[in-house]
């Protein structure tokens, strides 16, 4: 019975990693840093799986992309993408998942605290990604913020609000349909 539960958890992690892999490449190239749905998918994984398993699904996504499967924005993948100018944002997803997932786990019934956690997690993602972008592209911190953060704030806030309200409902419905066991 214990093995069955572990297999079930692995399958759920795999499904959420697959969803991130499907949504991750869908992007709008607006410059050096594209708009993608990756953070939206990761936030949903955190609501459905919790911090630990949601972060693992995020790491599986990154590993799949690292080996060259085109799951990153613009249907790209490989070590070059991770080491390139936007690689800091990709690696920053891990920190975003840990911070946001902590808040989501602790305050699942308080949307405003979950939103606060997603904002804090995204701020750390922005800091990590912007620092890497400035270094890799040899630009000032202000230029990196102008390219890699400022244009994304409204859209990212919208994604967080969507997930803050839809995430708990989706989780409840999955549990009710016996497709997921918390």
Image (tube, rainbow, N blue to C red):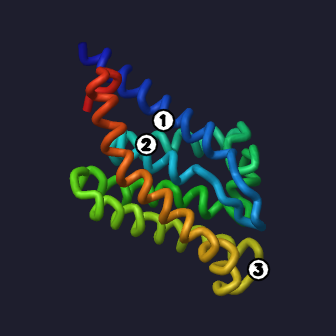
Is label 2 in a helix, a strand or a loop? helix
Which one is nearer the viewer's eye here, 27 or 80? 27
User: How many residues crowd mark 3 within 10 Å: few (<14), some (14–19), many (20+)?
Assistant: few
Is label 1 in a helix, a strand or a loop? helix
Residue 95 x/y as whole percent: 45, 59
Residue 39 x/y as whole percent: 53, 53
Q: Is residue 67 left or right of residue 176?
A: right
Q: Quadrant of the N terminus?
A: top left
Is residue 131 visible to us here?
no
First reached walking from the N terminus: tag 2 or tag 1: 1
Which labelled disc corresponds to residue 16? 1
User: How many residues crowd mark 1 within 10 Å: few (<14), some (14–19), many (20+)?
Assistant: many
Q: CA distance from mark 3 to mark 2?
A: 34 Å
Q: Which residue is mark 3?
A: 138
First reached walking from the N terminus: tag 1 or tag 3: 1
Q: Which residue is mark 2?
A: 45
Residue 167 x/y as whole percent: 37, 45
The quarter of the picture where residue 102 lies is bottom left
Residue 94 x/y as whole percent: 48, 54
Question: Which residue corresponds to the image point at 71% horizontal and 65% vertical from the top-left?
Answer: 33
Q: Quadrant of the C terminus?
A: top left
Q: Nearer the viewer, mark 3 or mark 2?
A: 2
């Amino acid at each position: 019975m214990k093995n069955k539960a572990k297999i079930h958890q692995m399958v759920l992690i795999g499904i959420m990693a697959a969803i991130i892999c499907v949504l991750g490449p869908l992007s709008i190239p607006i410059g050096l840093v594209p708009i993608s749905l990756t953070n939206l998918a990761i936030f949903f994984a955190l609501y459905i799986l919790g911090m630990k398993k949601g972060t693992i699904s995020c790491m599986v996504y990154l590993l799949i992309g690292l080996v060259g499967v085109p799951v990153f924005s613009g249907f790209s993948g490989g070590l070059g993408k991770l080491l390139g100018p936007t690689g800091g944002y990709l690696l920053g997803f891990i920190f975003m998942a840990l911070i946001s997932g902590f808040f989501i786990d602790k305050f699942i019934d308080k949307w405003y605290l979950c939103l606060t956690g997603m904002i804090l997690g995204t701020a750390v993602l922005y800091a990590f990604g912007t620092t890497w972008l400035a270094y890799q592209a040899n630009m000032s911190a202000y230029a990196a913020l102008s390219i890699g953060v400022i244009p994304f704030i409204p859209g990212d806030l919208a994604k967080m609000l969507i997930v803050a309200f839809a995430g708990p409902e989706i989780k409840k419905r999955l549990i009710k349909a016996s497709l997921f066991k918390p």
